[in-house]
Amino acid sequence: MFGQNHSARLHHWTTERLSEYLDNRLTPHERARIEQHLAECAACRASLETLRWTVALVKQAPAPALPRTFVLPVPAPRAQPSLALGLAQFGAVLATVLLLAVIGLEVLIQSSEALRAPMPSLAYESAAPTLEIAAASLTPAPQATPWREATRPAIPTAAPLFSPALPAAIAVAPLPTATPESTRAAADQTLSATTVPRVGIALVATTPTATSTPTPTATSVPPTATAFPSPTLVAQVREDTRAPQPTTPAYAVAPFDMNVLRALQMILLALAVFFSALVFVLWRTRR
Amino acid sequence: MDEPTCIQAAQRGDVAAFNQLVRAYQAQVYRTAYRVLGDAAVAEDATQDAFIAAYKNIRHFRGSSFKAWLLRIVTNRCYDLLRAQRRRPTASLDALLLDPDNPAPGLARAAPETPHEVAERHELGALIQRGLETLPHEQRITLVLIDIEGLSYEEAANVLATNLGTIKSRLSRARAALRDFLVQHQELVPARYRLKSEQV
């Protein structure tokens, strides 16, 4: 009984290890034990033979041919980032940002003016420019005072803001009997011709004494000339007498000319459109 | 370029270097997939998937054996496909292998043989493939890796991420089961491959 159990356990143990025995993966002791059992057990010898035959058959099985290669497609080198495209993108963004900034500036100016003028429509209808060149009108010059002494220093200096033709016209056509009203009317005309904002520069020429030195041209009156009692240019803002609020805060200079702002807007808009179109074209050509 | 250099280059995204590794191992990877799956088209897909997965994950490769790492990827893919096949069984493999006029297409010619010998080898290959199909997946893959692909027990344990004892056990059972199948279908074994012993 004991011998049969031992033989059965050895038979099972051997059967379990025939695979390793074939591959020579057993310790010498295990190997000796299996060989001892194989010498006694025909079934285990047969099992070993068929196992060896099976392993040999499997190794002889033909290998399948490779149906194709499995190499991965090598990606094409990536296109270098285009400098032109980058610049065009930068230009489009910059032009758009500047355009928005200029539009915002205009809105800001208009809103601040609207706050200062409670009735803007009425003011435009009735008054035209609310500021004018305060020339000799502030200090009514006597008749003996040549009008040029009063007006000349004022107009050429103010000319860049207004029409450049005005000083010349006045210079070549002297009006000895010019009254403060006529000068004022001329200034009003100039102001109304150019849509200057209602805040502007008023140049006041403090009229010197009657003994003035005539100057050859209207544009060559240096304020610091020693030989000439030069009129002091005082920039001041004078509220129009017709304005509803005579005590409006004064500005030293006009912030912006609206025409300049609008021209700038047009230029920036054109640039933004141009650069955007350029970006689109370059982007399409890269595809 | 040697293998470690190729691996390092591939880890930096060099596809050409990775393709050198593909050329070195594609036959073994496809063969394994074919033996495990038993279908040329499915094995082709599994091989392709395995190499794509290997390329995507090669940065994480830190092991010592690239072959083992690659075979682990393809065997895992085979497991997935086998599980899918189990859910949707098809008769394509049996039809393919049992058709005497179409003996396992894709099987390579070995040494110069007579047409009769070639036919016998193809018959043997088809029969072994049928026997492999009868094995549980784990046993089948273990037998393919060790007896067909020639991996050592340790390499197979590395590929299958298991211990040596499990490998020995699976291989022993797989061989015994395949042996029983072949003995049972002795008449289908080509004559020159038959067991000469009368002990069976």
Image (spheres, coloured by chain):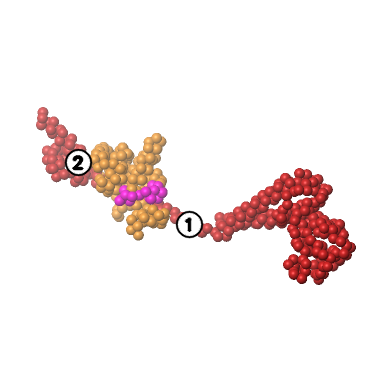
Instruction: Depth check: give the residue in front, A16 or A149.
Output: A149
Residue A69 seen in render: no
Tell me, what hue is chain B?
orange
Quadrant assignment for the N terminus of chain B: bottom left
In front: mark 1 or mark 2? 1
Instruction: Depth check: give the residue in front, B23 or A259.
Output: A259
> Residue A258 location, x and y as percent?
73, 54
What secondary structure is the magenta-colored segment mainly?
Answer: helix
Residue B195 sits in quarter: top left
SS of the residue under disc 2: helix
Q: Earlier in the sequence, mark 1 or mark 2?
A: 2
Instruction: Depth check: give the residue in front, B148 or B120.
Output: B148
In the image, the segment drawn in magenta is B50-68
Q: Tell me if residue A174 comes above or below residue A188 in the rendering.
A: below
Q: Tell me if residue B134 comes above or below residue B115 in the rendering.
A: above
Total marks in image: 2
Q: Which mark is residue A18?
A: 2
User: Is A264 placed left or right of A134 in the picture?
Assistant: left
Tell me, what hue is chain A?
red
For label 2, count other residues whose C-alpha is less than 10 Å away and answer few (under 14), some (14-19) or many (20+): many
Quadrant assignment for the C terminus of chain B: top left
> Residue B193 location, x and y as percent?
25, 46
SS of the residue under disc 1: loop
Does the segment drawn in magenta span residue B53?
yes
Looking at the rendered structure, the kind of residue marked 2 is: Leu
Q: Which mark is residue A76?
A: 1
User: Is A34 placed left or right of B139 in the picture?
Assistant: left
> Residue B168 location, x and y as percent?
24, 41
| Residue at x 75%, y 46% (from the top left corner) | A117
